[in-house]
Image (cartoon, rainbow, N blue to C red):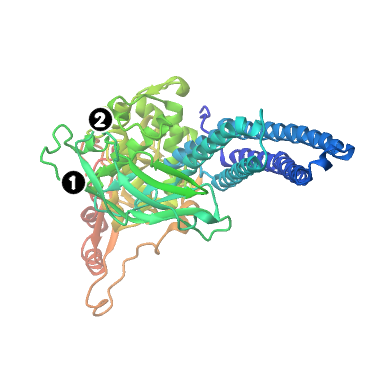
Amino acid sequence: MASVSFPPGVPIAWLKAASLRKEIIFLKKSEMQMTDQDVKYLEDLQEEFDFRYKTMQGMEQNDKNNVAVKQEMLMLQEMLNTVDFRRKEVLSKLAQVIKEMEDLMKNTLVEELLEWKRRQQIACIGGPLHGGLDQLQNCFTLLAESLFQIRRQLEKLDEFLVKLTYEGDSIPLQRPHLLERVNFLLYSLFQSSLVVEKQPCMPTHPQRPLVLKTLIQFTVKLRLLIKLPELNYQIKVKATVDKNVSTISSRRFVLCGTHVKAMAMDESANGSLSVEFRHLQPKEMKSCAGNKGFEGPQMVTEELHSISFETQVCLYGLTIDLEVSSLPVVMISNVSQLPNAWASIIWYNLSTNEPQNLAFFNNPPAIPLNQLLEVLSWQFSSYIGRGLNADQLGMLAEKLTGQQVIYSDYQLSWSKFCKEHLPGKSFTFWVWLEAILELIKKHILPLWIDGCIMGFVSKEKQRVLLKDKAPGTFLLRFSESNLGGITFTWVYRSESGEEIYHSVEPYNKGRLTALPFADILRDYKVIVADNVPENPLKYLYPDIPKDKAFGKHYSSQPNEVLRPTEGGDKGYVPSVFIPVSKILSDSTDPPSPSDLLPMSPSVYAVLREHLSPTVMETALSSPYSESAD
């Protein structure tokens, strides 16, 4: 599968941010140090001039006519020329430093911040863990400190005017413009420095950020990338929902809980000025107009909303208003809406890096299939610990497109992904895939992590894989017609040498709650033509002995028929689940609802004593035709 061009990974980002930090440090240590020295030299020079000038002014008129005084006058004129030259030189150097900082901000720092935000979007939908915010904080802080240092130098130059100014003086001509540029850069730097470090997320669904349920608490964390001790506990942040934003939804919300908090230095190694809201919950406001035109869970899950945060920084005579918004969130009122809401979050954050486009689903763009497939693999790696390989993704691609395509050339529509039913089915592709994710997470996770489950393989492909394999070779795959179902298919040979394939009725969450899947594979029996029960499963594809593949996942000893102890356990007789199937010749018979029959050991023992083996197995079995799902 072709690789996807997503933003650079964490190591590259760290290197770039580290390089930027070194550049700012070099600028601060070299040119800033030089301008400091120049300002200090200019201050000393001007003080000497001021002293000598005032000394000469204090002389008597007669003393001013002698040769020594005239020489002193020439010396003062020369010193004034030097002061003028030095003033122009300092202002020129300050202008150059300001320009270099402006270039760093516009061409590097802002770009790095945008790349971090894009990496955060990708991480929100299951992509690689993003990082680099500590490095960015170092860069922002160093740049802010440097700009404040320049500001102090410009203020120092203003003090020089009190003692000395003259016609053509460069300080009153150039200083106001330079100060305006510095203040503008500080405003811009601060306004960019407020970021949403952790996007809104319900603690109950940590792997599904940006989906919020009404009246359920969510958390969100903000950070100011400029870390200055003077700001500790001085910045109060207020959270609001859909502030001054026009949404496509007629639903309106308010935030309940603590929605104003102060930023504080955290206790991490690097430390940061941050605030975390942990007790916010959205509440829908009742409207007389109702929700006409927006009824139904499908439309609700396409509505995008915004959580905004605003504050004000007052520092060194500057007052700066700051505001930042979360990535768009989806508000749901029922947990059943979560899968489709999560699909909307995936599609938005994969499609665009716009921080706020709440009308996105008015006309959602198509997505390159190769990018979508990689994101689908992320859903498995982030949610259940193991991603998908190229073969598994190939099966998903065919299911999405109905054909074999070149991934990089195919554009998949939003409707095809999440709104249109699969051919001949009553559900969409995404609902089908989400049901599989839930099945794995809750019932067969260890088998998935160990790679025992091939999972995504079509009915046609499974025959190709099992062809020419040893009898009893089987593979595990997800049902294509049953939501959240898993089945196994095995191959054996008839007396004539013909290869025959059988698949069992898919196991869903209800049946897997009764008995672990690994135990089912171990104990599974079929009643063959001569009514002798046997386990047809010998080797996990391609050739791994079954007990070697699943042995560590067995939760109990093989089922044995035991007579109950007198009185049983607390008066109850233990039951045993016996997975039994009967292969019939007529393949058109409908499958029975279950092949797991609970039976107490005592009943089983009585049947063994009074019935022949053939009759007994028929009584125990759930006869249905084995048909490939």
How many residues crowd mark 2 within 10 Å: few (<14), some (14–19), many (20+)?
some
**Residue at point 10%, 40% (across, down):** 288
Give percent across and percent down for residue 191: 47, 40
Q: Secondary structure at mark 1?
A: strand
In the picture shown, does residue 97 fall above or below 532? above
Q: Residue furthest front?
A: 62
Q: Please name the residue that numbered disc 2 is placed on.
A: 421
Task: Indicate left or right for 470 with 517 as reference.
Answer: right
- State the quadrant of the C terminus: top left
How many residues crowd mark 1 within 10 Å: few (<14), some (14–19), many (20+)?
few
Q: Please name the residue that numbered disc 1 is placed on.
A: 285
Of residues 499 and 268, which is closer to you in this image? 268
Task: Indicate left or right for 67 with 157 as reference.
Answer: right
Q: Amino acid at mark 1?
A: Met
Using the numbered discs, state the Cα–Cα distance from disc 1 to disc 2 in whole angstroms. Answer: 33 Å
Task: Indicate left or right for 241 with 327 as reference.
Answer: left
Foreground label between 1 and 2 = 1
In the picture shown, does residue 355 fall above or below 561? above
Q: Secondary structure at mark 2?
A: loop
Give percent across and percent down for residue 422: 28, 29
Give percent across and percent down for residue 77: 79, 33
Evaluate whether residue 467 shows in this view.
no
